Image: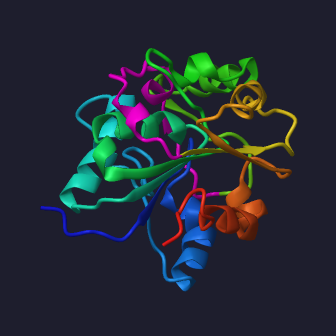
Amino acid sequence: MLTEIEKTYIFIPGGWHGGWAFDPITERLGKLGKKCIAITLPGLEPAPAVQNGIINLDTHIQYVVDFILNANIANVILCGHSYAGMVMTGVADKIPERIYSLVYIDAYVPEDGDSCWRLTSEAYRHVFASGAGADGFTVAVPPGAETRRRPHPLATFMQNLQLTGDYLRVRNRTFIYLSGWEQTPFKRQYENLKAAEDWHVETVHCAHNIMREAPDKLTDILIGPKIYGNN
């Protein structure tokens, strides 16, 4: 029997990042009295544990599913940034009854058989391929100032997502398009979704990391009636 009746935000970070990427958002939501959890996916921990097998997309999906089930959380507002769109769609396909809404924050919106590799741009395919040259298993951290980022498991970018279609039972879906960076691989996705009757689409003119660039704006969107509801 489910004991959790309040809505809970669960945040899934994008490539190379941990749950810490959402600190500016979870801090703001916490002050507003909202329950929120930011997850760090396997292989992206500050000191990753030794793995007996390859970490792939299935690994990440099952990790989040198990987290939700073991904590007995319902009414989940599942939010994912960038790569995490792959993960959250897989999670929603497995446990749609636990999900209140899906929020794709400049994130991939896959269908059955898609992979991050297939959906992304040529520029990012080059990043994935060249970044895996060191060990063939992880993609090196791209240049940047954030030192907490970790090498990302290559197989999670490459594996095709297998969906039953149950994720479509989650009718409350939002896509947040961040229009302020030239390298975005999400423009065509935005064009496809902006007029869709079964999607709520927001546009924010900022760079890809809205959690750092415009945390107040993202927080305002997340607590709005289209995502959180009226209660």
**Foreground of the two, 42 or 24:** 24
Tell me residue 217's x, y (percent).
75, 65
Residue at 23% over, 62% down = 71
Q: Is residue 33 above or below residue 230?
A: below
**Foreground of the two, 160 or 103:** 103
In the rendered image, residue 162 lying in the magenta stretch gets the answer yes
Tell me residue 111's x, y (percent).
49, 21
Q: Is residue 117 above or below residue 229?
A: above
**Foreground of the two, 21 or 49:** 21
**Foreground of the two, 218 or 230:** 230
Looking at the rendering, which quadrant does residue 145 occupy?
bottom right
Looking at the rendering, which quadrant does residue 193 occupy?
top right
- The answer to whether 22 appears left or right of 9 in the picture is right
Tell me residue 45's x, y (percent).
42, 54
Look at the image and tell me whether residue 90 can be seen. no
In the rendered image, residue 104 lying in the magenta stretch gets the answer no
Figure quadrant of the N terminus? bottom left
| Magenta highlight range | 147-172
Tell me residue 167's x, y (percent).
39, 34
Residue at 69% over, 62% down = 218
